[in-house]
Amino acid sequence: MNNSIKYSIAFIAFIVLGLSLYNASWIADEPKGKIKLVGHGKWPLPVDSNDCIIDAQLALNEKAYNADVRSLRTIGAYDADGINFETELEGGKLVIPRPPATNCLSDLERPRSGIVPAIEAMSALDIYMPLRSGDDIKADALVQALKGKTFPNQVWVYGNDILTKKVAAALPNVKALPIAAARQCITDYKSSGWYGNIPDSCAQGQAIITLDDGFALWGWPNRLMARFAENDIAILIVKDIKEGELLGLTKVDSYGDIPETFTGTIWVEDIKNLGPALIR
């Protein structure tokens, strides 16, 4: 082997070693903070022998809530930091879904709750509401409902990139989680993160990582999280994304796929069983 080949091999080895150290997670400082769990709302409420919701109110500071709001508030018992719930249009205004269906006529005649009292009833829980392609009327109704309102908790809209950004631009108290853009951030980082580059697609401030991404990400977990934190990019871990829908964790053993040092947000499908298990 001549000297030129030896030098070439040594140079390549030096470059590989340098990149390995540059992206080494164990060299980076351990992230500060804790994980945040976002679970799905809408839980069954106790029913009587006629399958009608029992009217015993779950009150906070002596305030009684409608059955649909009570159904959402149940999530607080499962160590959730945020709640994801759907919204529906009724008479041009946004309301939250009824509790899981019963066969009771009086339950179906109960008044619906608007999203403002629902958000207020969630106390310190972050709120996540979906906006899908074609939800233009719902997006406009959301702006009208929340305009000028402030809440102690953070309100998010997630889903369709155009609609979520439109709502967030109109409401300073609301943040956008555009799924396609947040996912593109990670896709681009896989290509350019080897030299520490933060892609332009991450400029919207959100990144979505699936459980399958793992070691395909440069500097994962600590180095990547440090880079993203320096650029004000929040990280959300989900199980998967199917047809534009976020799929949350459903099994406790999924926790093993998430590094112990992770301090971002985790999307959980079965918060009742996984919530207590994922708390560190």
Image (cartoon, rainbow, N blue to C red):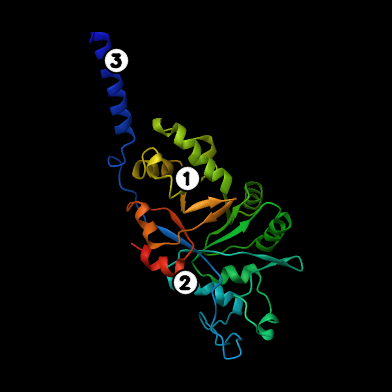
The residue type indicated by label 2 comes to Gly
At numbered mark 1, what does the secondary structure look like: helix, strand or loop?
loop
Among all residues in the image, which is located at the extreme front? 1
Q: Residues within 10 Å of mark 2 (few under 14, many from 20)?
A: some
Label located before the other in sequence (1 or 3): 3
Pointer 3 residue:
8
CA separation, marks 2 and 1? 27 Å
Pointer 1 residue:
233
Label located before the other in sequence (3 or 2): 3
Vertical placement of 144 versus 190: above or below? below
Q: Is residue 153 left or right of residue 164?
A: left
Q: Nearer the viewer, mark 2 or mark 1?
A: 2
Among all residues in the image, which is located at the extreme bottom? 49
Pointer 2 residue:
76
Label located before the other in sequence (2 or 1): 2
CA separation, marks 1 and 3? 38 Å
The residue type indicated by label 3 comes to Ser
Vertical placement of 65 versus 1: above or below? below
- Residue 56 screen position, x and y as percent: 55, 87
The quadrant of the image that shows the N terminus is top left
The residue type indicated by label 1 comes to Ile
